[in-house]
Amino acid sequence: MPIQAPRHIGTDLAGVIASDRVLTDASSLARYSHDRADWADFTEPLAVVLVTSAEEVSAVVRYARDQGIKIVPRGTGTGLSGGANGVPDCIVLSLELMTQVVELNPAERYAVVQAGMINDDVRAAAATVGLWYPPDPASSAISTIGGNAATNAGGICCVKYGVTRDYVLGMEVVLADGDIVQLGRRTAKGATGYDLTGLMVGSEGTLGIITEVTVKLLPLTGRGERAIVGYFPSLAAAGTAVAEVSRAGIIPAALELVDRTCLHAVSAWQGVDLPEDADTLLLAKIDEPGARGEELSQQLAGIFRAAGGADVQQSADSAETDRLFQARRLAYPALERLGPVLTEDICVPRGAVPAMLASIQETAARHCVVIANIAHAGDGNLHPLIIAPEGDLEVKDRAKLAFDEIIARCLHLGGTVTGEHGVGLLKLPGAAVELGERVGRMHHAVKDSLDPEHLFNPGKAFS
Amino acid sequence: MPIQAPRHIGTDLAGVIASDRVLTDASSLARYSHDRADWADFTEPLAVVLVTSAEEVSAVVRYARDQGIKIVPRGTGTGLSGGANGVPDCIVLSLELMTQVVELNPAERYAVVQAGMINDDVRAAAATVGLWYPPDPASSAISTIGGNAATNAGGICCVKYGVTRDYVLGMEVVLADGDIVQLGRRTAKGATGYDLTGLMVGSEGTLGIITEVTVKLLPLTGRGERAIVGYFPSLAAAGTAVAEVSRAGIIPAALELVDRTCLHAVSAWQGVDLPEDADTLLLAKIDEPGARGEELSQQLAGIFRAAGGADVQQSADSAETDRLFQARRLAYPALERLGPVLTEDICVPRGAVPAMLASIQETAARHCVVIANIAHAGDGNLHPLIIAPEGDLEVKDRAKLAFDEIIARCLHLGGTVTGEHGVGLLKLPGAAVELGERVGRMHHAVKDSLDPEHLFNPGKAFS
């Protein structure tokens, strides 16, 4: 039973939130009831509130606390782990309308943006002053910077440039008592007090609601763009190439792997011809400019060939690079044509990538499910994509078994259950094993210290 | 009155800690009673315990908790803010004997080292397998990796390569109940749970005792070493050069500033001839290899000259680079000859460096104290060095007034009271202003959640 009837929330918040931004119609409640992880549990919210300022967030927080209602914060709901799925008796608080650049400071190389700003828009705004925001999750065209910060989102360029955490200097956060605080700094360095900014990054909305993010930017200039791609006869051969790149001391700006299942799905969909014996595709980028970039690109192509790579192509032209990376970009939509996709996000030691991929193939065969793999191979971050044909409930059960087995194997290999998507709901059991009982208790202690009434996103991120 | 007579601690810990590692003699108690910030308050400990394992740390923690004794953890005591100064009724727990490499993993590019290992020794160990540990505090020859992590130490190469926080992947920590936990990960990426590793970094020993640190390493190869130095006729001219370097999108591997007072102290001590009108020295490093490095070096030298830099020299030879950086290296010892040095560690927006330095000169003149400046100019991180001739108590009072004024001015300019040394005791009032009351309360809540009895380093890092 809801504590508060949905239709009252708009009335209760009248004078604080414009009535057209408090949604209680059936279609909105359904639409906002989960992110892209509808494999995980979700409950329809009592209401959806579209906020436009930290002050409005604060008012909703105080109201919810008074009423004993929970708050599930979200951006555009592109999460893949259920972090924004509705919980019983909750308001879904969406920051998607908070899309403004608050400050863009070229001299100090930072931007202050509202939490609902789309990742690509942050990058575009930075580019207008010759600066670059590196973190590039696959969802960059549709996911928000606040959600990226809340989940510590990664991406393709992380192998060289790091993840969201590495670019968040500070933030504005609404706390569980409704107070609005500024955390972090805008200077290049700083060591004052606990890193509460870093604690908020990746906390999946369980400690406070991020309303504004200050991100560090890099110079846009001085980088080249060279692509190197090669087809390998086996996962093992591609794994050897990845290990050799690392051993040579090369840190590419991207090092992606696309497996046979993905390649054939793209080929079948787009009519792309694959080289004979093509089993695994590796795609790399080198962004050192000039002669150094050319030298590294040649060296990388040589490593690809030595490891058995065929049809190795190099490009220093951005249109050609885009074409070469096409198979990577089309993999996910090509697979979605085959049925709902359950996305894994494990990260194992780089050297364990071939063993992990082999184990995934074995798991797929044993449970009679299709599992395709896209991997940020240079980071050891794998995305096994488990495909269950629509409506086949029994396949869905087998998919979940495969999912659990992959996580167990990843932990056995010294890996982590989430490289960049967050724990949400889907990874709760794996996270509990990974963290262990004592570190789990530390999580509860920290949660209780900052959100004693468990107002924010209860039941997410840790169990 | 001490809760426990010092001479009992050795007896009490017999069977757990070898008796020769429990020090209670007057000389040891005096020696371990403070770090390099003897300007701050300190109290002699009841005993000094030199531990050799996490299990020993755990035993001391449980003992201290039972006895109501506080614990002040420390490495080699090179801190400059009083973070390791003794507090009433405490054991100083030193990790300086824990100096082993636990694991060095070239394939995954990380090292696991005990907390007492010296920073330079970590770098040397990494180099044996072709890898590099970047963070390079000025104390790198004498400070420990555990202390570096506890204070989030910086250094010269931070402007390009980041601070200690950016290299700590995980750690072993002894908690306030004596439990030993592993935090973080050894994979390249990871987003499982709260970033408790990051919370420990910079927490100055107030949340747990770090016994082991897992650090990320970079390839050692692929970097050149070019130095560019120039003398400027004024702080303003040097400030213009720093701003122009940033505007050009160049991120040098070092960009250091040495002011007139330092230059003249070095010149007087070493008989180094200074160019006529030399007021401020800028020293830069460029580490891109090959033609790109040469191009950037030329570009930087051009910016120096255009901003009024005289005697601009470039070097691509490491011995010559060392010679050019000599004035930077000798500045601190040259100043220490003039009297005890009170070291500031403010960080302001890069663009505010000239205004901050001008304000410092004005403060020095008004309080009739000598203040020299070394600055990580590329980061806006300034080290005003306030010199008080030995024995002159009145000068010491004026020095403290100047110290407080500099901090107030730094905050007014949007800066932070500590860029890389930590708050310790010296920066407590400034940190309170910087964090504000509500964020201060968040600190207390987090502290209480992980160290409810305030066993670890009470009264440090935040007030």
Image (cartoon, coloured by chain):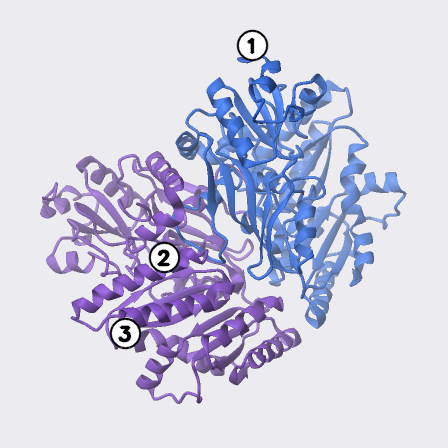
Chain colours: A blue, B purple
Q: Which residue is mark 3?
A: B336
How dense is the environment of label 3, judged by Cα within 10 Å: few (below 14), some, or many (20 and up)?
Answer: some
- Do the numbered discs 1 and 2 sit on residues whose CB atoms are within 8 Å? no
Of the 4 image quadrants, the one containing the N terminus of chain B is: top left
Q: Earlier in the sequence, mark 3 or mark 2?
A: 3
Asked if residue B56 is positioned above or below residue A408 in the image, the reply reads below
Q: Which residue is mark 2?
A: B408
On screen, residue B404 versus residue B65, left or right, reads right
Query: Which amino acid type is shown beneath numbered disc 1?
Result: Met
Label 3: element kind: helix
Vertical position of residue B234 compared to residue A394: above or below: below
Residue A84 sits in quarter: top right
Q: Residue at x 62, y 51 (%)?
A: A158
Q: Position of residue A372 (x, y in %)?
A: 73, 37
Q: Chain of mark 3?
A: B
Tell me, yes or no, whether dots 3 and 2 are on the same chain.
yes
Marker disc for residue A1: 1
Task: State the CA–CA distance, disc 1 to disc 2.
Answer: 55 Å
Side of B339 where A126 appears, left or right? right
Front residue of A38 and B188: A38
Residue mark closest to the camera, 3 vs 2: 2
Q: CA distance from mark 3 to mark 2?
A: 25 Å
Q: Chain of mark 2?
A: B
Residue A323, x across and y down, in percent: 82, 53
